[in-house]
Image (cartoon, rainbow, N blue to C red):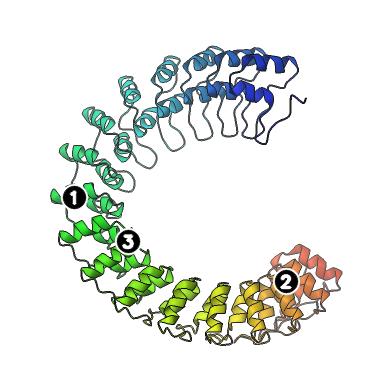
């Protein structure tokens, strides 16, 4: 049997035995010539694995046999780091006593003492500090050992490090202090200890978040209570204008919201975007918070800076229960935002069928268009929401209604590759030849975006593959320009004229060349495209390829007879 054969993760037999602490097996395999320096796919050698899993006798044996005590895995984790991270004190001691460098950091800047602090191994932390580990060593984002311990709620480690002189005011690069980290993660006892030691509870991070903001956001009620009792600013808002009650409402922390409101927090205070707490709760589907705030008298019609009301936000995100509650409380379902988007339009655009049904059942206008002319059926078709499209059509939606740019629902669906929607609309009588204001037909739009199956369907339904837009671009020209080879092949097989130029004189091969689509260029040339045909500016395909730096395209064209000295109207040759 091959004693060196590795599994799919790169584990050799000696690695597996070392990882699991089977010393006798390790000895046997090493005596048989097993290579103890071979690493697995993640860069872990047997000594790394044994250190990580806490097998001191295996570690000793491997080092005696020449294993590299400094070997790091793919993320820079050395044996002593791995042992410290997992709290294996005896292994750490052995490695350090045998010369392991406790100052070497992994790729993220974490030293062994950072790792041990983060994972709550006080005895390892004590040993490393006694051996000279730097208590101030910060990782790449500024996280010191005491910060790591506070962040993860390891009170005993925090106390020890503070007693050893760790700076409780030290902040990460983002400005987060120890007390902020502990508050954010709900570690009340750590927060209490740090505050008792003088940690500043009003110090904000770079985004303006104080510890009490963070605790409110994460729903840690007891931490919020403690910090407020200690004098934290009840009205503190972040730089984005998020107050305590807003942050709690945003994440649905009803108990925190209740506590803050009962304490007198302004339940109507909006953030910089004009979002009130009830808006935030509605947008994120926190019904109980919405109910509480409404019962407290907040205005369900209060709009954000963009004109979005809570019911519009809830509808947009598919929060049916919230929509129902708000409507029952008098929310106006016809009120549009600044872009003219009503709740039913928002719900249709995002495919929330049940919300659409409810709103239409309550009298919402299913034909109302936004400022860009998007009706609900258009919005649903554009985004491929077939079930919503079907419902709206059954309710009488106009499938021919175009937006301000002349895009009909079938055009929008074709442009975005929603074949099932295209089929449904065409079956319902939608005009598959109707062009938008720029002269783009559905088949042109589908070809331009590489939606082969849509192109095939439309052509089978009689779409004109020679119809050009206002700039003279045909579907094959557009598909060539964007490198959609399979679409180009299909259109050519269906009789598309590959020599037909647009208004600027660009043929499909010129268009493909200009964008470096070698496969399309080869296909068109094989089909007889003229490699010398110049556009209105006198630019031939090889001029275009050279100008744009497409070497392989230029080589191919020259091999096919393109003239390398042909100049455009400005006298520019390919060279």
Which quadrant of the view contains residue 512? bottom right
Which quadrant of the view contains residue 550? bottom right
Image vertical order of residue 402 relative to residue 62, above or below: below
Q: Residue at x 44, y 73 (%)?
A: 388
Residue 429 x %, y %: 53, 87
Residue to which mark 2 is pinned: 513
Which quadrant of the view contains residue 300? bottom left
Q: Is residue 397 left or right of residue 64?
A: left
Residue to which mark 1 is pinned: 258
Q: Is residue 440 left or right of residue 296?
A: right
- Can residue 305 be seen by looking at this rendering? no
Of labels 1 and 2, earlier in sequence is 1
Q: CA distance from mark 1 to mark 2?
A: 65 Å
Of labels 3 and 1, earlier in sequence is 1
Of labels 3 and 2, earlier in sequence is 3
Residue 216 x %, y %: 26, 46
Residue to which mark 3 is pinned: 283
């Amino acid at each position: 049997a091959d004693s060196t054969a590795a599994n799919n993760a790169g584990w050799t037999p000696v690695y597996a035995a070392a990882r699991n602490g089977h010393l006798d097996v390790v000895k046997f395999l090493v005596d048989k010539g097993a290579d103890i320096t071979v690493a697995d796919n993640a860069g872990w050698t047997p000594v790394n694995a044994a250190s990580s899993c806490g097998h001191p006798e295996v570690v000793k044996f491997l080092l005696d046999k020449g294993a590299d005590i400094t070997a790091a895995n793919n993320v820079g984790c050395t044996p002593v780091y791995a042992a410290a991270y997992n709290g294996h004190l005896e292994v750490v001691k052995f490695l350090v006593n045998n010369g392991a460098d406790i100052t070497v950091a992994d790729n993220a800047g974490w030293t062994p003492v950072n790792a041990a602090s983060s994972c709550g191994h006080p005895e390892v932390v004590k040993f490393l500090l006694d051996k000279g580990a730097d208590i101030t060593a910060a990782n790449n984002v500024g996280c010191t050992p005491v910060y790591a311990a506070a962040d993860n709620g390891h009170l005993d480690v925090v106390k020890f490090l503070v007693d050893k002189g760790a700076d409780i005011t030290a902040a990460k690069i983002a400005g987060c202090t120890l007390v902020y980290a502990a508050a954010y993660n709900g570690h009340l006892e750590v927060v209490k200890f740090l505050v008792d030691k003088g940690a500043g509870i009003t110090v904000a991070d770079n985004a303006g978040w104080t510890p009490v903001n963070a605790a409110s956001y994460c729903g840690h009620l007891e931490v919020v209570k403690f910090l407020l009792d200690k004098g934290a600013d009840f009205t503190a808002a972040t730089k984005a204008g998020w107050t305590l009650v807003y942050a709690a409402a945003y994440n649905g922390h009803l108990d925190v919201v209740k506590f803050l409101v009962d304490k007198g927090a302004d339940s109507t205070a909006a953030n910089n975007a004009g979002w009130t707490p009830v808006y935030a709760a509605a947008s994120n589907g926190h019904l109980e918070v919405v109910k509480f705030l409404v019962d407290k008298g907040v205005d369900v019609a209060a709009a954000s800076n963009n004109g979005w009301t809570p019911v519009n936000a809830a509808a947009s995100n598919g929060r049916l229960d919230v929509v129902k509650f708000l409507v029952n409380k008098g929310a106006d379902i016809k009120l549009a935002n600044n872009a003219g988007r009503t709740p039913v339009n928002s719900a249709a655009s995002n495919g929330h069928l049940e919300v659409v049904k409810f709103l239409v059942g309550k009298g919402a206008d299913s034909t109302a268009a936004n400022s860009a002319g998007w009706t609900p059926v258009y919005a649903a078709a554009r985004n491929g929401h077939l079930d919503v499209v079907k419902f709206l059509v059954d309710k009488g939606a106009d499938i021919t209604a175009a937006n301000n740019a002349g895009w009909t629902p079938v055009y929008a669906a074709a442009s975005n590759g929603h074949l099932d929607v295209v089929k449904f609309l065409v079956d319902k009588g939608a005009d598959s030849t109707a062009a938008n204001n720029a002269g783009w037909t559905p088949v042109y739009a589908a070809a331009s975006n590489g939606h082969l199956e849509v192109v095939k369907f439309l052509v089978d339904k009689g779409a004109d593959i020679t119809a050009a837009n206002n700039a003279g671009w045909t579907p094959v020209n557009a598909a060539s320009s964007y490198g959609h080879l399979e679409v180009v092949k299909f259109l050519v097989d269906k009789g598309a004229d590959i020599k037909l130029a647009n208004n600027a004189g660009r043929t499909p091969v010129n268009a493909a060349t200009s964008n470096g689509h070698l496969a399309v260029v080869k296909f068109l040339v094989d089909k007889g495209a003229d490699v010398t045909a110049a556009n209105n500016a006198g630019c031939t395909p090889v001029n275009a390829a050279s100008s744009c730096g497409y070497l392989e395209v230029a080589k191919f064209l020259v091999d096919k007879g393109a003239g390398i000295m042909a100049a455009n109207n400005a006298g520019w040759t390919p060279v």
